[in-house]
Image (spheres, grey):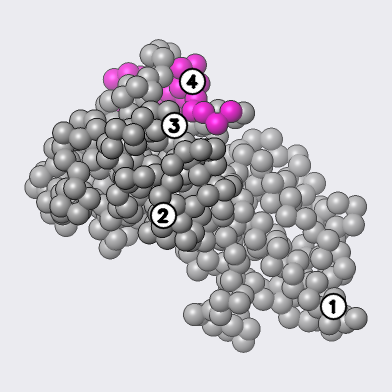
Amino acid sequence: MSEYPEKLKDVLDDFGFVTDRSERAELLMDYASRFEPVPARIAESPYPEDHRVPFCESEAYVWSEPEADGALKYFFAVENPQGLSAMAMAVILDETLSGAPIEKVAQVSQDIVLQIFGREISMGKGQGLMGMVSVVQAEAKRHLAEQD
Amino acid sequence: MTSISERGYAHPDVLVPTDWVANHLNDPGIRIIESNEDPLLYTSGHIPGAVEVDWTTDLNDPLRREYLDKSGFESLMSRIGATPDTTLVFYGDKNNWWAAYAFWVFQLFGHTNARIMDGGRKKWEAENRPMTREKPQYQTTQYRAPERNDDVNRAFRDQVLAHVKAKQPLVDVRSPAEYSGERLHMADYPNEGALRGGHIPGAANIPWGRAVNQEDGTFKSADDLREVYQNEAHLSPDDDIITYCRIGERSSHTWFVLKYLLGYDRVRNYDGSWTEWGNLVGVPIER
């Protein structure tokens, strides 16, 4: 975790103080309420399958776009209007990893899902959210490889 | 869709329409319970007065693969302010999939005064009925539950094996791809660790969602259900039937349909389901 982007470390610290399930849900709802789908200049529905997050029943999609400083901006779509957990995860990933050094983004573990949503999250839901982390991580690794 | 009383169900009282729920929001003898797959949905808004029962944290033992025990159920009922006389009304997302699962667990403790809201959360929202983010607080109760009774509505692996050997009917409610062994889990859902694909020998494949009208989430009429379960799957009301899926959630929906809507007396849900059977050494599998 010491190598994680600073904003992500701050968010994980915040969730580390959450002990109550209801409080966690409220915090996650705050994130979900800020969700904005991918802009049309990046992609429009129906979205291409190669951007789809594996194992996510909320039908989440991920894109990345290079910024001037070499970092990446991440974009998300969540097709299921009741996919609030996926929307919350998308906002957290965008707000903490967009603009962060891609070397650090590439090191982010899927375990952050358990830190954010709690270890009692169902395997099905957890795997879908972990899939979102994996796709973001894969985007960072792909750009790193292209820079080499 | 026709009214519940006109659909020919064996036990129509086990379903209540959204209108009925809307007219009983302040009835102290009613406790409305929301059970969802997504842990944030209830917090985002729910029927006024409804409490949440979470299938992971409330219904399962935190350590073992097992449901809550007598003490846990008493604590849960106390928390939601229910007494043995309280009428419980379950509803939730995904066409009441998780509501049926919660309903089934509650039946293991014999709280038969329970209903499911026809159409679930989907229908309530589509009708623009009131939703709130306010979480109700009910006075805790002293609920005395019996020991959990797994004999009537639940099946275990040895019982399933004996059932197979006796060539008794089973219903596999997973998708055709899971049933055939082409896929080890639901499309878009993770592989929850089954080492082998296929189905329990002799099981008919009737995906759970076929019991539901997809446009509004309500249950199909008894005639339409009989067409599926009797004419297609060749089940009979006198059969001893075991339903299963991946972990027992989807199959609790079908258990509800067979037992209450069609009136089959002997239906058990095998909650070990494919995540157990697909990992067991030496048990028979068909593809």
Q: Which mark is residue B12?
A: none
Residue underneath mark 1: A145
Q: Is residue A80 visible?
A: yes
Q: Residues within 10 Å of mark 2 (few under 14, many from 20)?
A: few
Q: Amino acid at mark 3?
A: Arg
**Res B244 quadrant in image:** top left
How far apart marks 1 and 4 lie (CA) works out to 53 Å
- Crowding at mark 3 (Cα within 10 Å: few <14, some 14-19, many 20+): some
User: Where B249 sits versus A103, above or below?
Assistant: above
Secondary structure of the residue carrying numbered label 2:
loop
Q: Bounds of the magenta span?
A: B64-88
Looking at the image, is mark 3 or mark 2 earlier in the sequence?
A: 3
Q: Compared to B31, does A59 lie above or below?
A: below
Earlier-in-chain disc, 3 versus 4: 4
On screen, residue B118 above or below A62: above
Name the amino acid, label 1: Ala
Q: Cα distance, mark 3 to mark 2?
A: 19 Å
Of badges 2 and 4, nearer the viewer stands 2
Residue B71 sits inside the magenta stretch: yes
Q: Are marks 3 and 2 on the same chain?
A: yes
A68 or B198: nearer the viewer? B198
At 48% from the left edge and 64% from the top edge, which residue is drawn? Answer: A80
Q: Chain of mark 1?
A: A
* Residue at which label 4 appears: B69
